[in-house]
Amino acid sequence: MSAHFLDTKGMNCPIPILKAKKALADVPDGEILEIVATDPGAVADFEAFCRQTGNELVEWKEEGGVYSFQIKRVA
C-alpha cells in the first residue's frame, strides 16, 4: 500500500473537504488518504463527509492543535 498524504493546515471549511474529495479520486480503492488540518471543525466535517460518501474514517486524532485523519477509500 502506498502512502497518500494531504496537508490542509491553515485552511478553513470547506477547503479541507474539497481538497480531500479531489485527492481521494486519485487514491485506489482500499487505500488510505492521510489528511492533516488545523481547523477544529474538520472533525465533524470529515465524519459527515465519510457518512455521505461511503468512505471509511479509519482514525482521527488531535495533537498540539493539528488534526490527523485517515480515510480509507471505498468503491
Image: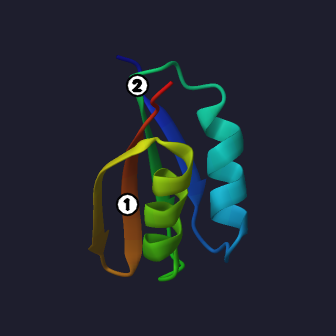
From the image, state whether disc 1 or disc 2 is nearer to you.
2
Rendered view: 6 above or below 37:
above
The residue sitting at 39% across, 22% down in the picture is: 30
Return the x and y of residue 28 as percentages of the image width and height. Answer: 52, 18
As measured in the structure, the alpha-carbon distance from the residue carrying label 1 to the one carrying label 2 is 16 Å
The residue sitting at 50% across, 64% down in the picture is: 48
The residue singled out by tag 1 in the image is 68
Rendered view: 25 above or below 11:
above
Pick the front one: 66 or 29 = 29
The residue sitting at 67% across, 72% down in the picture is: 11
Return the x and y of residue 41 as percentages of the image width and height. Answer: 52, 81
Label 2: how many residues lie within 10 Å, few (<14), some (14-19) or many (20+)? some
Q: Earlier in the sequence, mark 1 or mark 2?
A: 2
Q: Amino acid at mark 1?
A: Ser
Q: Amino acid at mark 2?
A: Glu
* Residue at disc 1, secondary structure: strand
* Residue at disc 2, secondary structure: loop
The residue sitting at 53% across, 70% down in the picture is: 45
Label 1: how many residues lie within 10 Å, few (<14), some (14-19) or many (20+)? many
Return the x and y of residue 40 as percentages of the image width and height. Answer: 47, 83
Rendered view: 35 above or below 1:
below
Q: Quadrant of residue 16?
A: bottom right
The residue singled out by tag 2 in the image is 31
